[in-house]
Amino acid sequence: MAFSKLAELPPEIYSAILSQVPTHQRQQATLSLTRAIPRSPVPLHHLFECIYLKTPESVFQLYRRIRGSAEEAGWVRSFALETWTVDADIVVNLLSILTRLRRITLFVGPNFAPEHLEQILEKPREGLLYLSLQFRPYVQRATYYQFLKGAYFDTALQALSQWPSHNLPTLSIVQDPLDPEIAQARRFAQPLVFFHFDVLTKLVCSPCFRSASNLRLRIPSRQVAPFLFNAPQAAPALKLLDLSTCLVRFADVEGLIARFSNLKHLILNGCSITQAHALEGEWEVFGKMVALGTVKAAKDREKKLKAWLQSNVAYLQTSADGVSEQPTGEQRTGRRIRPGRRGLATATISLRDSPPTEVVHVVQRNTSIPKDEHTIRTEFQQGWEEGIALLNITRSRLYQSWKNGVRVMYISDDQGMEDGFEGLQDVDSATLFHDVQCVLCPAPVLCLAGSDDTTKHAEGCGHAAASRIWDDVI
């Protein structure tokens, strides 16, 4: 009797019920409903909205089911391949007919060749909002095919960097660490995932990454940070960056903070930027460095501007004296700048708005930390306050210089290629100095826990933000 009543419910009621089910459970919940109440009008599109494939057989079964049905293929919005052993050719064919995906999660195991992933990513997906690539290329027997052929997944990232401008807010590229037991048992070199990290620079500067706000990049024990922050146009909208397991140094953290002005969360699980036996005052130095990250950005930009001005001064002087000729088809105009005249070469660039509001530094729990957490936080707070004090002194000095007629400029949000005055704007109002005072700027949240959910985290730490973005537990 109860089942007959349920069978009379309209499809809209079932849709409303299923919309409350978590996405990773919706497929199974829909299937269970259709089996328990076979005559019920359960909308079948819920069966295909979020696909999670955990066996090689299920990949082929899904492909055989939807390859002849454009309607069913169009229902799929989220696709997750969560098996390391699969026929990669079938995966390529399957994804080629799923053209309306908004989320893609791929486990890339030893059966995947770089050509497979390149085929998947070579055609832009306009509606894609979430892309997660997790690599585990390790093998049980020695093979030198990859080394001899030069087969690395650099080409896949190169294909992704060629996508036109559109909104891809979340990207995850993770290489799983090699199991120490496997490394001991198999004494041979395992395949590499990426060979040249220059492709990371191309990716973060690409049109499709202009609006990216979340990046998780984990390549164990490899120093990838400089390939991100040394590029002028790298990810201007980035708010959360996870470089866990990478090799990250103090200078890298400073460079990251200086480059990404909108960064709110920096997660460094297992990066060991502090040694097991930290030097006295090391955390204080770290806190001060975080506070003064924007000062580094301003100084670096000022050096580039001065170098550009000096090179143009030399060019105009030699041109005016008739020492060199103008290149064919190129005309330069401008007044002659007399030797010894400093002019714009001494233009001062102001600091950006304020330090990041939240930076998370994480140390693995299995790392021996000689100091207790209270001491670490105290030192970090002291360093932060010292840095903020210096920041306010610098801002006051710039304000006085500006009132005395010195040309003061600031770095705009659109920094461009940082060539000459590109990305710089003149300060034309005292409001800029008063609106960004950091006298009472609170210190960032410093979380010393790992990513384990059972570990007590600092309130409001970046792990909580990351867990809302990525629906996995890595």
Image (cartoon, rainbow, N blue to C red):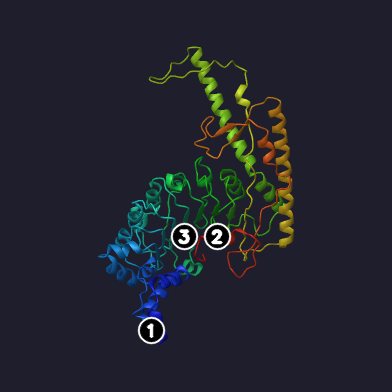
Q: Which mark is residue 184?
A: none
Amino acid at pointer 2? Ala
Judge the density around disc 3: few (<14), some (14-19), many (≥20) Cα neighbours within 10 Å: some
| View extreme (bottom): residue | 1
Helix, strand or loop status at disc 1: helix
Picture quadrant of residue 116: bottom left
Q: Is residue 107 above or below residue 443?
A: below
Task: Give amino acid for label 3.
Answer: Gln
Instruction: Identify the residue under disc 3.
Output: 175
Image spot of residue 410 (x, y percent): 61, 35
- SS at mark 2 in the image: helix
Q: Is residue 188 above or below residue 309?
A: below
Residue closer to the observer: 417 or 32: 32
Front in this rendered view, residue 211 or 177: 211
Q: Which residue is mark 2?
A: 466
Relative to residue 262, is residue 461 depicted above or below?
below
The three-letter amino acid code for the residue at tag 1 is Ser
**Mark 3 or mark 1: whose residue is earlier in sequence:** 1
Disc 2 to disc 3, how far (Cα)? 18 Å
Mark 2 to mark 1: distance in Å?
44 Å
Tell me which label, 2 or 1, sits earlier in the chain.
Answer: 1
Q: Position of residue 345 (x, y in %)?
A: 60, 25
Q: Locate residue 133, reporting x and y percent.
A: 43, 59
Check disc 1 and report the residue beneath it: 4
Residue ID at (47%, 57%): 172
